[in-house]
Image (cartoon, helix red, strand yellow):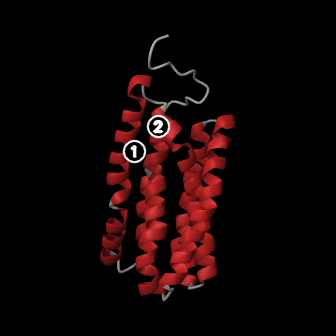
Amino acid sequence: MVASTLYHLVATFALSIGPRNYGLSVTGLTVATMVAGVVSLITIPLSGRLSDSGGRKRNYYIGIPLAMVTVTVYFLYLLPSQNILLVGCGMVVAIGVAQALMYGVEGALISENYPTPVRFSGFSIAKQIGTLLGAGFSPLIASSLAAAFNNNAWAYVIFFGLEAVIALVALTLMKETYRTPLQPAVPR
């Protein structure tokens, strides 16, 4: 669940290292996270609408590379700049655009890959296990990488890049279902 890892690194983990390593204010980072969340209120539904005309996978094919670029720029340039406005803009692009592109279609993309009678159970299990294993531990992993690599931001960038590549491979192997007629759960 690369979209969740993106959020946990850019918002949660950055809230830890921003003040400690770069002297950024907790308040400024919290406000930036809130602004990115407000932008997401608009962009997540737009992402869903976009997928209705071009497919679910397309949003991920745009969102994952955008997330990779954003994480790289965010950790290597924006946080070290110590400019809260630049950091906030990076957060808005990461959460309000890249993550929103993926979140807006996540439910449909995953659930449509299961037969109708188990569609939402399949989605829920895949989502919860993926989020737990893929994203839930990401701040802990990033903190461990920070300790092991003397706060070298490349460690977080490479960690996210590996997860993003795995997500792209999995996405490529997934079938596109947006134009496939759905079978009713109860026969008519």
Question: Which residue is rendered at x = 53% and y = 49% of the image?
Answer: 103
The residue carrying pointer 2 sits among few (fewer than 14), some (14 to 19) or many (20 or more) residues within 10 Å by Cα, namely: many
Q: Position of residue 149 (x, y in %)?
A: 34, 76
Check disc 2 and report its element: helix, strand or loop: helix
The residue that disc 1 covers is 127
Residue 77 seen in this snapshot: no
Q: Nearer the viewer, residue 122 or 71?
A: 122
Which numbered marker is on residue 103?
none
Q: SS at mark 1?
A: helix
Q: Is residue 124 above or below residue 115?
A: below
Residue at the spot 41% in from the left edge and 37% down from the top edge: 123
| Structural distance between the alpha carbons of marks 1 and 2 | 8 Å
- 80 displayed left or right of 148: right
* Quadrant of the image occupied by residue 180: top right
Percent across and percent down for residue 70 are: 57, 64
**Quarter of the image where one finds residue 81:** bottom right
Q: Dot 1, crowdedness within 10 Å: few (<14), some or many (≥20)?
A: some
Q: In the figure, 135 relative to 76: above or below?
A: above
Q: Is residue 7 above or below residue 143?
A: above
Residue 133 screen position, x and y as percent: 32, 52
Answer yes or no: is residue 176 visible.
yes
Note whether 100 is above or below 106 in the view shown.
below
Q: As rendered, which of 95 and 173 lies closer to the eye?
A: 95
In the rendered structure, are the residues bearing label 1 and label 2 in contact, judged by CB atoms less than 8 Å apart? Answer: yes
Please give the residue where the numbered disc 2 appears in the rendered image. Answer: 110
First-in-chain label (1 vs 2): 2
Residue pictured at 41% horizontal, 71% vertical: 13
- Find residue 183 and report its horizontal and vertical position in percent: 50, 18
Amino acid at circle 2? Ile
Tell me the kind of residue under disc 1: Lys
